Amino acid sequence: MLDNHSAHISKETRTFLATLPNRFAFAFTPKHGSWLNLIESFFGKMAKTLLRGIRVASADELKARIELYLKEVNETPVVFRWKYKLETLSVV
């Protein structure tokens, strides 16, 4: 699933994907529905809980902090429960 970022729908991207027929099937989230993009939500939460207001001395330190966060998140995973029935969603 992709959002409607210009890199995902650009002429260049569509041209490249045309060279790989039947390899990918894309579903685009509505422009007003970024909350549907779970990875965007995940990174938003990480930015709020880990990255807001910190200062790091180097890119390596930032990478280490992010990797530690991911390790901690994976130690106690939370199962995402979708609250909507597939029949109630409209596909564009």
Image (cartoon, helix red, strand yellow):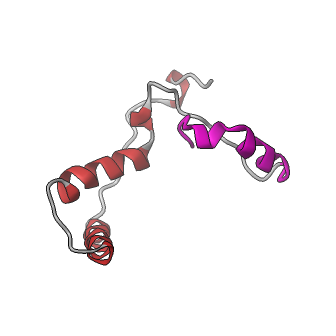
Measuring from the top left, give residue 63's x and y in whole percent: 33, 72
Q: Residue at 37% of width from left, 34% of height from top?
A: 83
Could you say which quadrant of the image residue 2 lies in?
A: top right
Magenta includes 16? Answer: yes
Magenta includes 56? Answer: no
Could you say which quadrant of the image residue 37 lies in?
A: top left
Measuring from the top left, give residue 62's x and y in whole percent: 28, 70
Image vertical order of residue 27 relative to residue 46, above or below: above
Classify the position of the C terminus by image quarter.
Answer: top right
In the rendered structure, the answer to whether residue 4 lies left or right of residue 78 reads: right
In the rendered structure, the answer to whether residue 30 lies left or right of residue 13 reads: left
Q: Report the magenta residues as a range.
A: 1-21
Measuring from the top left, give residue 12's x and y in whole percent: 74, 44
Q: Residue at 35% of width from left, 45% of height from top?
A: 41
Q: Residue at 34% of width from left, 54% of height from top?
A: 79
Image vertical order of residue 63 relative to residue 25, above or below: below
Image vertical order of residue 48 relative to residue 72, above or below: above
Choose between 62 and 21: the one closer to the eye. Answer: 62
Measuring from the top left, give residue 47's x and y in whole percent: 26, 53
